[in-house]
Image: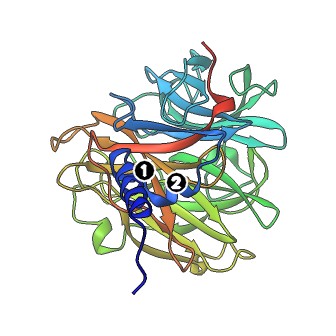
Amino acid sequence: MLKCPFKVVTFLFLLTGCFQACNISRSEHNNLSSTDTLIRFTNPIAESAQDPWIIKKDSFYYYCHTDKWNRLCVSKSRFLHKLGEDKVVWTTPDTGWNRNTVWAPELHSYNNKWYIYYAAGLSGPPFIYQRSGVLESLTDDPQGAYIDKGILNTGEDPNDPTGTIWAIDFTISVINGKLYGAWSGWERNADTDKTSQNIYIAEMSNPWTVSSERVKISAPDQSWETGGPLDLNEGPQFLKHNGHIFIIYSTRESWTPEYRLGQLTLKDSTAALNSANWVKSGPVFQGTSDVVGTGHASFTTSMNGREWWIFYHSKKSYKPGWDRDLRLQKFTWNKDGSPNFGVPKKAGDTISYWMSKSLLPVY
């Protein structure tokens, strides 16, 4: 029988205790280098906020959101969990289709330019005029000046921009060298906002021009997507990893505790406009007794690219409404290549990530 020296046993015991006391997992420890430092935080990371969008670029995280339904703001931070100081980059015009009710902006980098996709309308409630538009940066600074590139054609005919159909949550991604847009929209315009929403996709010739007919790739037709006052699919987000392409979207009603995430998996990346190539599964992320109304997610990675993070909002109570906060947590990948988001962590649970000491702000 091989005996282990007392000093070695003691060392192993102390090392194990360190993992537990410091709340460091073995996988986290494996990612540690002499140039890294451990950052700890707890959820929620922001109160009274919603529709979170985050993007990492050149060792900074940029967070894009609305303010007072008529302004778009971008903040900049070295830290994943700390939102930086807001800078207003665009304010709604006094007249026009986009003068009111600005929702859920997204900041994207494409061909050395920045683009902000947003939804807006003439008025509301009722929110029957929502359409999607896009801004283009005038500089290489995501917090710099933007110009309005106009309304996106989310109708049946890409050559008829006057025939737009209700649309929100527009997002973009490159698949097989082609630019695509995906959004949440109505089958046809209606005089009530109690109208079901679907997920559509179309090809784009540039970041402000839809160049193909829209294709419906998801409708609220599964048991876990229905049963409330209004069936809907919204908030689509592209998620790509190791050659796999997904759209993660929100379903059920955003003002209820049942809000959750579903998943579309693209089987053939050469045929993104074929609805049969998008396979639905879910729910892939949903609330618990402690965290409810989890939805409208975006995704990013740690600065070293080793960890994947989901950024989402949740309701503050079971009471219907849009009083929400923002939360972050790590997720992993299943053997089949699909994301494994786990379950929402409770408020107050310690969450950590590694950050290069060279990126820490100097005070």
At 34% from the left edge and 38% from the top edge, which residue is drawn?
43
* Above or below, comparing residue 362 to residue 216 in the picture: above
Q: Which residue is nearer to you in this view: 234 or 297?
A: 297
On residue 24, which mark appears? 1
Residue 142 is at least partly visible in this image: yes
* Above or below, comparing residue 82 to residue 93 in the picture: below
Question: Residue 349 appears at what percent x and percent y?
Answer: 30, 44
Question: Residue 132 appears at what percent x and percent y?
Answer: 58, 41
- Tell me the CA gap for discs 1 and 2: 7 Å
Instruction: Name the image colouring.
Output: rainbow
- Left or right of 355? Residue 226 is left
Q: Quadrant of residue 57?
A: top right
**Quick one: SS at disc 2?**
helix
Labels 1 and 2 touching (C-beta < 8 A): yes
**Quick one: SS at disc 1?**
loop
> Type of residue at label 1?
Ile
> Type of residue at label 2?
His
Q: Which residue is mark 2?
A: 29
At 43% from the left edge and 20% from the top edge, which residue is drawn?
68
